[in-house]
């Protein structure tokens, strides 16, 4: 089966989902990426990417319970699918393959 | 407050499909930032987020999936059908109401379409036209157009198969069969082709029959052949007496053929025998067919050119005459494009349908509100608002569909059974193209009305019910909240009850009017008099006609059982013309006033067995030209003479109020006084001050015969009357034969129909109101069962608790009753300036007491709907109510 090639932001989102595990939903994913990459992200940008990943079959989603801090609104949780895990592993492998031996030169850039 | 506003703005640009969780994320993030970095930092972030969302949505194509617009599925229809069975009360009440609304709409639409927008039931109907002449100076049609027809026949190319017809009514005399008038068309033989008529037996008329030298022939209609000739196939070749002609029957037309309008016999139009100077002769109508490639516009252009040429050649007669080409079915007084009237009718129908369906919507809302948990679960499982709206619309559509079917069937039966009778009572015999059947146009109207009704009854409550569904999800899980009856439903209930109050009042008014007409006292024994209208053939001369009328009177008077025969210009109680007269008062001043004139034959009062009270009766000499005598009735003495002795008083006809002053009229002298003998009409507002002038029968504008039969079957004398009239003069046409006490039966019949319709509407309105009130109260009790239980458990008096719960709905009911009473009173006051009979009757304590009693009755009726919910509320056990969730 062909592995799907991921875009750069898609990789960030998938890695965030892996890190956050059961707590992976729009707000936490955005916060995680923003904190680690210092990028300013909008909620809609995150959901756009999540929706695209779900359409590609790389993630799945389910609706959680409403909570008071969300004004009684429900959460939409995300988790990695097998294809998503395979795609992420391939992307990481490719990145590491390209980056191997360049650590010093990348730091000096 | 600011935060909520900012959040609302920030979420505006979010896609609808994901709005819930994205909004939740925003709120969560806002709270986190507010707690870690302060509220203003959080607000700043929220503003930034808004701008990013807006800019992102504006600049890029949304990658979020467009929400799939829900649509109706067959499952919704299946559920709708199940709802009909599960809630038989609503199905019966709501369904009957909607069926009635559709019934009224379809009947009215069909009748008005047929009258206002008629079309011929013939192939190529849009190409069959009529040509008429219009006098633009007098703003009226010119019917004497035989001269112009001869010219058009030779010069018009855009219209082919040109033909003409003249109307007449002749006695068809058949030995052994009662003779009676038959509508006859003297018609160009081409009319049988244009009207697409084939002979059932024999043949139609041909051009050879129109030759002056040809023997007289006639073609008779199918119904005449059946009713007068007993469907005898041997009728072909028989000679019949038609007026004073003796034509041979050459054909019987196919069933249903009545071209040119509503005719039962056809004679050939012999143009060569008809010498017609311009704008003289008998009334003639012209028909034809548009030539291939021609349109109404091109035909009109050609006729206009010919008309201008005639105006140049014959300026004395044709200067202001314009020929006009119009679709054939749009005859004079038919197909008038009265948009304002049509708009008023369709507005009324739409308002009726909206009101009824709005009330059905109230019942559907109450039913749906009782299934609120079901709808909440559906929403929780992902059903959007549009899904639920479609579901409720489907339920209403199924109900409306069944109702429309019932309404259509009822309308079809009504139109076939009473529709034609109703129209003929108002318009006379209907043209052949006025067929009250359910046409495809009517079906389209019914479908549109059904969908509209379903939208009002289903979509309105659906939107109300699904508004704020998310909040109610939250409240439902917390055990509170739910759908409520809001402002719109309050208006619907109040309006429904107010309108319900009007209907019985309308029925009361109609019955009052019917009773006034039916029980009108004519001042003589009307049931012992037979009346009839006498007409002469158009070609007959006046001298012969006068002789025939006198001979008829003589022979009738000599008939055993008859004690009086007379003529009048108008029959009692059918309305007489008003006349402006002036007379000298006691102070010598001449003042003008209005009175009502009746022209009668001199033996009128003797025949009516109503001798004069004072003075003398008319003599035959009084009917001679130059005679200036009159007899007045008691109303004239009271209203015009203010009680003065009428004998010897003088009056004369006064000029019209705004007209130029003509030479003074001669004075008339009052020679006699009689009691009131029906110069007033029962449907007139005020009592008529009547005066009688004598005239010989042939000089009356119309001749109405009155025959007094003190004993025996008066109605059965009609056949004898026809026999004697035919024997006197076969051209005398006798019609409208009825007893004098049945003169207004047509009006009473039409009013009776209206009473039946408005009675059904009243009953339906009352049942709908009761159902609406019951639904609201029942819903309120169910919703507040827990509250009732808590209050009673805490020591509240059960009655006071119930009263507090039901107070608001009952106030609405009371308001509706008061509003309705106000509307009834306002209508009574508004009618006081109108021509409605009895409108100026002084209002007494009795009238107000009747209105008060009516209000009490309606309150009691509306209270019936309170009983069951109130009893249910009274039976609520606090422990049970508190346990129930």
Image (spheres, coloured by chain):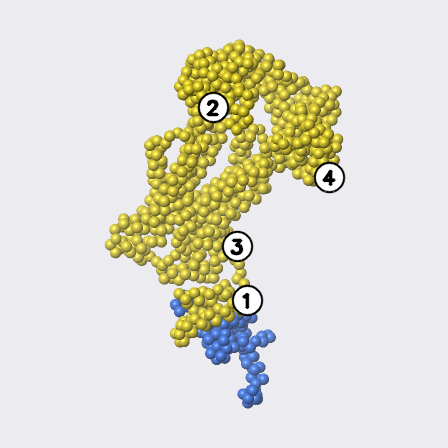
Chain colours: A blue, B yellow
Q: Which residue is mark 1?
A: B58
Determine the CA span between mark 2 and mark 1: 82 Å
What crowding class fits label 1: few (fewer than 14 Cα within 10 Å), some (14-19), or many (20 or more)? Answer: few
Q: Quadrant of residue B375?
A: bottom left
Instruction: Please report whichever mark, 2 or 4, sits nearer to the chain's N-terminal start.
Output: 4
Q: Going 40% across and 55% down the picture, which residue do you hit?
A: B483
As drawn, the label of residue B292 is 4
Side (left or right) of B855 relative to B730:
left
Q: Position of residue B472 (x, y in %)?
A: 40, 59
Q: Going 52% across and 12% down the picture, which residue do you hit?
A: B622
Determine the CA span between mark 3 and mark 4: 50 Å
Numbered disc in front, either 2 or 4: 2
Side (left or right) of B625 relative to B539:
left
Numbered disc in front, either 3 or 4: 4
Element class at badge 3:
loop
Q: Is residue B686 above or below residue A68?
A: above
As drawn, the label of residue B610 is none
Q: Which residue is mark 2?
A: B592
Nearest to the observer: residue B690 or residue B593: B593
């Amino acid at each position: 089966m062909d592995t799907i090639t991921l875009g750069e932001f898609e990789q960030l989102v998938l890695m965030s989902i892996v890190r956050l595990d059961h707590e992976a939903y729009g707000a936490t994913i955005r916060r995680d990426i923003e904190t680690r990459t210092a990028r300013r992200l909008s909620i809609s940008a995150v959901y756009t990417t999540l929706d695209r990943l779900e359409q590609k079959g790389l993630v799945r989603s389910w609706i959680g319970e409403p909570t008071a801090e969300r004004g009684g609104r429900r959460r939409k949780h995300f988790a990695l699918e097998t294809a998503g895990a395979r795609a992420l592993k391939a992307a990481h492998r490719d990145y590491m393959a390209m980056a191997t031996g360049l650590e010093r030169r990348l730091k000096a850039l | 407050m600011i935060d909520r506003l900012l959040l609302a703005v920030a979420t505006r640009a979010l896609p609808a499909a994901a709005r819930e969780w994205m909004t939740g994320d925003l709120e969560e993030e806002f709270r986190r930032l507010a707690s870690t970095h302060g509220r203003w930092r959080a607000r700043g972030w929220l503003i930034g987020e808004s701008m990013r969302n807006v800019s992102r949505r504006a600049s890029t194509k949304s990658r979020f999936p467009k929400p799939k617009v829900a649509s109706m599925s067959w499952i919704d229809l299946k559920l709708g059908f199940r709802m009909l069975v599960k809630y038989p009360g609503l199905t019966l009440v709501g369904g009957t109401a909607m069926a009635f609304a559709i019934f009224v709409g379809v009947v009215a639409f069909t009748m008005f379409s047929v009258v206002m927008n008629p079309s011929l039931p013939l192939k190529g109907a849009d190409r069959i036209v009529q040509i008429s002449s219009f006098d633009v100076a007098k703003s009226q049609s010119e019917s004497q157009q035989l001269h112009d027809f001869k010219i058009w026949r030779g010069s018009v190319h855009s219209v082919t198969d040109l033909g003409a017809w003249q109307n007449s009514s002749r006695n068809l005399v058949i030995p052994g069969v009662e003779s009676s008038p038959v509508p006859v068309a003297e018609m160009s033989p081409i009319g049988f082709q244009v009207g697409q008529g084939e002979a059932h037996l024999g043949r139609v008329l041909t051009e050879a029959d129109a030759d002056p030298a040809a023997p007289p022939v006639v073609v008779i209609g199918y119904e005449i052949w059946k009713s007068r000739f007993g469907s005898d196939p041997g009728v072909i070749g028989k000679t019949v007496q038609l007026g004073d002609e003796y034509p041979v029957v050459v054909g019987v037309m196919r069933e249903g053929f009545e071209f040119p309008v509503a005719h039962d016999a056809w004679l050939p139009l012999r143009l060569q025998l008809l010498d017609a100077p311009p704008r003289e002769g008998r009334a003639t109508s012209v028909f034809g067919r548009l030539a291939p490639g021609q349109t109404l516009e091109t035909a009109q252009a050609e006729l206009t050119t010919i008309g201008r040429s005639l105006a140049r050649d014959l300026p004395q007669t044709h200067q202001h005459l314009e020929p006009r080409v119009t679709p054939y079915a749009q005859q004079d007084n038919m197909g008038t494009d009265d948009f304002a009237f049509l708009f008023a009718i369709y507005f009324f129908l739409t308002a009726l349908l909206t009101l009824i369906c709005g009330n059905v919507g109230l019942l559907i809302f109450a039913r749906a509100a009782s299934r609120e948990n079901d709808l909440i679960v559906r929403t929780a499982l992902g059903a959007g608002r549009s899904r639920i709206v479609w579901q409720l619309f489907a339920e209403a559509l199924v109900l409306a569909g069944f109702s429309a079917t019932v309404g259509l069937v009822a309308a079809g039966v009504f139109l076939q059974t009473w529709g034609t009778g109703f129209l003929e009572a108002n318009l006379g015999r209907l043209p052949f193209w006025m067929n009250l059947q359910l046409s495809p146009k009517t079906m389209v109207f019914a479908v549109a009305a059904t969908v509209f009704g379903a939208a009002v009854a289903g979509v309105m409550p659906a939107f109300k019910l699904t508004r704020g569904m998310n909040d109610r999800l939250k409240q439902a899980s917390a055990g509170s909240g739910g759908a409520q009856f809001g402002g719109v439903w309050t208006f619907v209930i109040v309006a429904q009850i107010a309108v319900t109050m009007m209907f019985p009042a309308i029925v009361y008014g109609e019955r009052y009017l019917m009773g006034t007409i039916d029980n009108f006292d004519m001042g003589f024994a009307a049931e012992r008099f037979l009346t009839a209208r006498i007409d002469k053939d158009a070609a007959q001369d006046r001298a012969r006609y006068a002789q025939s009328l006198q001979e008829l009177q003589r022979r009738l008077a000599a008939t055993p059982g008859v004690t009086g025969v007379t003529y009048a210009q108008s029959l009692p109680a059918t309305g007489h013309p008003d006349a402006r007269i002036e007379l000298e008062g006691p102070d010598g001043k001449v003042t003008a006033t209005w009175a009502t004139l009746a022209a009668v034959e001199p033996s009128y009062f003797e025949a009516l067995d109503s001798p004069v009270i004072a003075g003398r009766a008319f003599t035959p000499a009084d009917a001679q030209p130059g005679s200036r005598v009159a007899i007045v009735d008691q109303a004239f003495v009271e209203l015009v003479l203010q009680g003065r002795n009428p004998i010897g008083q003088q009056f004369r006809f006064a000029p019209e109020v705004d007209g130029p002053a003509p030479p003074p009229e001669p004075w008339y002298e009052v020679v006699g006084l009689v009691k009131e003998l029906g110069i007033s009409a029962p449907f007139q507002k005020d009592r008529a001050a009547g005066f009688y002038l004598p005239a010989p029968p042939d000089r009356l504008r119309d001749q109405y015969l009155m025959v007094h039969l003190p004993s025996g079957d008066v109605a059965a004398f009609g056949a004898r009357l026809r026999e004697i009239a035919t024997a006197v003069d076969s051209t005398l046409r006798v019609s409208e034969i009825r007893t004098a006490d049945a003169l207004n039966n047509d009006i009473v019949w039409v009013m009776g129909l209206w009473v039946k319709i408005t009675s059904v509407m009243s009953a339906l309105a009352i049942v709908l109101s009761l159902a609406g009130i019951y639904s609201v109260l029942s819903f309120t009790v169910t919703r507040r069962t827990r509250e009732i239980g808590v209050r009673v458990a805490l020591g509240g008096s059960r009655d006071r608790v119930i009263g507090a719960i039901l107070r608001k709905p009952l106030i609405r009911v009371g308001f509706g009753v008061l509003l309705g009473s106000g509307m009834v009173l306002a209508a009574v006051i508004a009618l006081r300036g109108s021509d409605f009979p009895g409108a100026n009757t002084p209002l007494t304590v009795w009238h107000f007491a009747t209105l008060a009693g009516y209000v009490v009755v309606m309150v009691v009726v509306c209270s019936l709907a309170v009983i069951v919910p109130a009893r249910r509320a009274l039976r609520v056990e606090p422990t049970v109510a508190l346990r129930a969730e």
